[in-house]
């Protein structure tokens, strides 16, 4: 491809150009097994496969041309795609042949394919299942650990297919209504029942006033209610005019007075309609939460995306599928950050093997590495501690390898980033709008500053990345909470690894106890209190806790302003139990305290909630703050 000159060129380079293989799932297209089976005879030939093949439309000229054009499109790419075809139907064929997988097993094929072309009505319109198998495949694909590109390719009504697919990835929202809303729904239900008893209102008429398209409009990608749709309903605007007119026409008796719904009741009616319609379509919802769901429905462009995939919807015909996919990606408007991330993935895939081979030629170095895995410690440790130390050394190896790969491909990423900037500058810097964040708005700017600072000082959460909590070793920079107090581990990492000698105990040893120094941190009441002088003083860090970015510092911003030269910090010696292993985000520790009445040390067992881990340089900064505090010198100056 020539040098990029437009946003479309950037999208092509980041998402389309890396594609190398495609899996086409269509119950009327021929599979390799069917093609070869037709040339076999005798006992080698499967009658079931032959019967299945004959029932497919690919024997007809129009469908054969459709398949041929589709295959030719992917063959024309440079380099040409690896193409596989699957019929996506399981019940009629032996378990040893194509088409025998469950939707989940079929979705696993995509792990070996870059692009999925999925026919919506795999069962055929005559079965009346209306795309159920395709939706199950789609849900499975978007639940795996890969970022997938999918094209729903169908001859069905595209709007219906789109709305059914979106709903199949949602969970019902009525269960999320708060107590006040539920109470209002109960009160309105009694009013509507009374109106129905009087014969002027039928609750069952909802099916005529609300369909799947209108329901999707009421939903917000964040899982709740679309506030804009709510406003349209209240005003009786656009697609909500019929539902609004129906609600405002309701009359019910209160004593001798005939009444209509009040504004408050009308507001509740909107939620009532959603609740009742969700009961009608309850079987269509997803059983699990699909993260990152968003969508766009326009006449010439329909797409949805989740955190693990992007799906566009295309009518069957002579169109260029890759062109349609690219147009949908353009409509999505991926951010510069996402373009860079996609380019990074491609460069790792493209250059990884070559770079890996170069590095592994240093066989003596890697022979020694593997020796450290086989024999992680010369000390007498328990099997559990040895395994933990082995895992720690493997993590260090992965970190170094990742750093090496990133170092060797960074020039390509920087070059691509320069293309983004140059194209954006020629268009008047429009790409920043793709983030949907207005940095001229003071509130949004403050949120952006907090999130950015958290990003640069904290490592990402492994729980968020994997979906489950992992056991890990206490390390320098781990931020934890004990009761209402915040602490950060300020002991060098080398002293926290299993098997390390410690001078904390003058007599005896216990490898299950790991002494460390903890620096106490104060929660900053408001992030806006932190000026540039504060955050660059080395006294603060940013973490995320319960969905909010918070600031933590060695002192409050007020004290830091009053006494900027103060180097004293509050630290305490603690002892981690279980070798310092953090399990399910929890750390068992002993907090050592001096009991003055009896002049003896006592320790109190406490459970700490490990919230975040600082990047190495930020952890080192707090370690140095402890060192500076304990080594400070009192000077004899006077002020008067």
Image (spheres, rainbow, N blue to C red):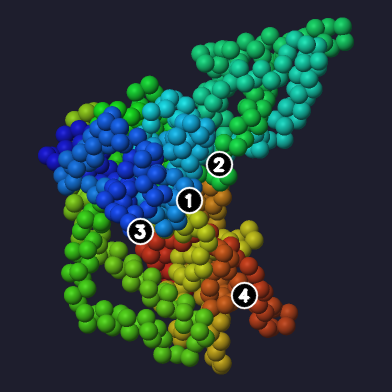
Secondary element type, mark 4? strand
Disc 3 target residue: 43
Disc 4 target residue: 590
In the picture, the disc for residue 63 is none
Nearest to N terminus: mark 4 or mark 1: 1
In the displayed orientation, state which residue is furthest to the bottom.
507
In the picture, the disc for residue 102 is 1
Q: Percent from the top left, x then y, of residue 278? A: 62, 31
Secondary element type, mark 2? loop
Nearest to N terminus: mark 4 or mark 2: 2
Report the residue at 27% width, 31% height from top.
61
416 vs 590, left or right, is: left
Q: Is residue 264 above or below residue 114?
A: above
Disc 2 target residue: 286
Are dots 4 and 3 in contact, CB under 8 Å? no
Q: CA distance from mark 4 to mark 1?
A: 51 Å
Q: CA distance from mark 2 to mark 1?
A: 17 Å
Q: Percent from the top left, x then y, of residue 433? A: 34, 31
Q: CA distance from mark 3 to mark 2?
A: 44 Å
Q: Nearer the viewer, mark 2 or mark 1?
A: 1
Q: CA distance from mark 4 to mark 2?
A: 45 Å
């Amino acid at each position: 491809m020539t040098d990029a000159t437009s946003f479309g060129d950037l999208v092509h380079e980041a998402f389309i150009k890396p594609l190398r293989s495609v899996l086409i799932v269509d119950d009327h297209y021929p599979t390799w097994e069917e093609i070869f089976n037709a040339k076999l005879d005798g006992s080698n030939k499967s009658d079931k496969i032959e019967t299945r093949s004959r029932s497919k439309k690919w024997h007809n000229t129009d469908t054969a041309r459709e398949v041929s054009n589709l295959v030719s499109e992917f063959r024309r790419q440079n380099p040409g795609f690896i193409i596989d075809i699957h019929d996506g139907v399981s019940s009629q064929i032996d378990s040893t042949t194509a088409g025998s997988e469950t939707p989940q097993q079929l979705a696993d094929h995509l792990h070996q394919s870059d692009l999925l072309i999925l026919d919506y009505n795999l069962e055929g319109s005559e079965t009346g299942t209306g795309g159920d198998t395709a939706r199950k495949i789609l849900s499975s694909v978007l639940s795996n650990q890969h970022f997938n590109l999918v094209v729903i390719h169908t001859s069905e009504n595209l709007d219906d297919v789109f709305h059914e697919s979106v709903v199949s990835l949602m969970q019902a929202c009525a269960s999320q209504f708060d107590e006040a809303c539920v109470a209002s729904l109960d009160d309105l239900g009694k009013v509507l029942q009374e109106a129905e008893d009087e014969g002027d209102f039928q609750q069952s008429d909802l099916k005529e006033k609300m369909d799947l398209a209108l329901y999707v409009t009421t939903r917000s990608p964040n899982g709740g209610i679309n506030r804009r749709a709510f406003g349209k309903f209240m005003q009786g605007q656009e697609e909500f005019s019929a539902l609004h007119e129906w609600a405002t026409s309701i009359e019910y008796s209160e004593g001798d007075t005939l009444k209509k719904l009040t504004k408050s009741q009308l507001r509740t009616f909107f939620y009532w309609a959603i609740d009742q319609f969700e009961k009608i379509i309850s079987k269509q919802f997803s059983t699990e939460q699909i993260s990152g769901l968003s969508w766009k429905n326009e006449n010439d462009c329909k797409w949805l995306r989740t955190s693990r995939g992007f799906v566009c919807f295309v009518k069957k015909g002579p169109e260029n599928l890759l062109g349609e996919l690219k147009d949908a990606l353009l409509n999505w408007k991926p951010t510069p950050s996402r373009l860079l991330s996609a380019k990074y993935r491609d460069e790792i895939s493209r250059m990884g093997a070559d770079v890996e081979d170069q590095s592994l030629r240093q066989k003596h170095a890697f022979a020694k590495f593997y020796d450290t895995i086989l024999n992680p410690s010369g000390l007498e440790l328990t099997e559990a501690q040895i395994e933990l130390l082995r895992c720690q050394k493997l993590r260090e190896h992965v970190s170094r390898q990742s750093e090496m790969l990133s170092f060797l491909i960074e020039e390509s990423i920087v070059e691509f980033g320069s293309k983004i900037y140059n194209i954006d500058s020629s268009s008047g810097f429009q790409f920043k709008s793709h983030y949907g964040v207005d940095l001229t708005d003071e509130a949004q700017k403050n949120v952006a500053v907090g999130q950015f600072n958290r990003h640069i000082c904290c490592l990402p959460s492994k729980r968020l990345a994997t979906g489950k909590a992992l056991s890990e070793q206490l390390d320098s920079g781990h931020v934890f909470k004990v009761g209402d107090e915040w602490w950060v581990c300020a002991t060098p990492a080398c002293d926290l690894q299993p098997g390390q000698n410690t001078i904390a105990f003058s007599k005896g040893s216990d490898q299950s106890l790991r002494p460390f120094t903890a620096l106490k941190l104060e929660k900053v009441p408001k992030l806006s209190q932190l000026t540039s002088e504060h955050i660059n003083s080395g006294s603060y860090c940013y973490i995320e806790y319960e969905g909010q970015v918070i600031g933590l510092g060695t002192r409050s911003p007020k004290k830091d302003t009053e006494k900027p030269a103060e180097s004293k910090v509050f630290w305490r010696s603690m002892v981690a139990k279980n070798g310092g292993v953090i399990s399910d985000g929890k750390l068992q520790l002993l907090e050592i305290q001096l009991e003055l009445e009896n002049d003896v040390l006592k320790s109190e067992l406490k459970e700490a909630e490990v919230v975040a881990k600082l990047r190495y340089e930020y952890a080192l900064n707090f370690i140095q703050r402890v060192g500076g505090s304990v080594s400070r010198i009192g000077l004899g100056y006077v002020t008067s």
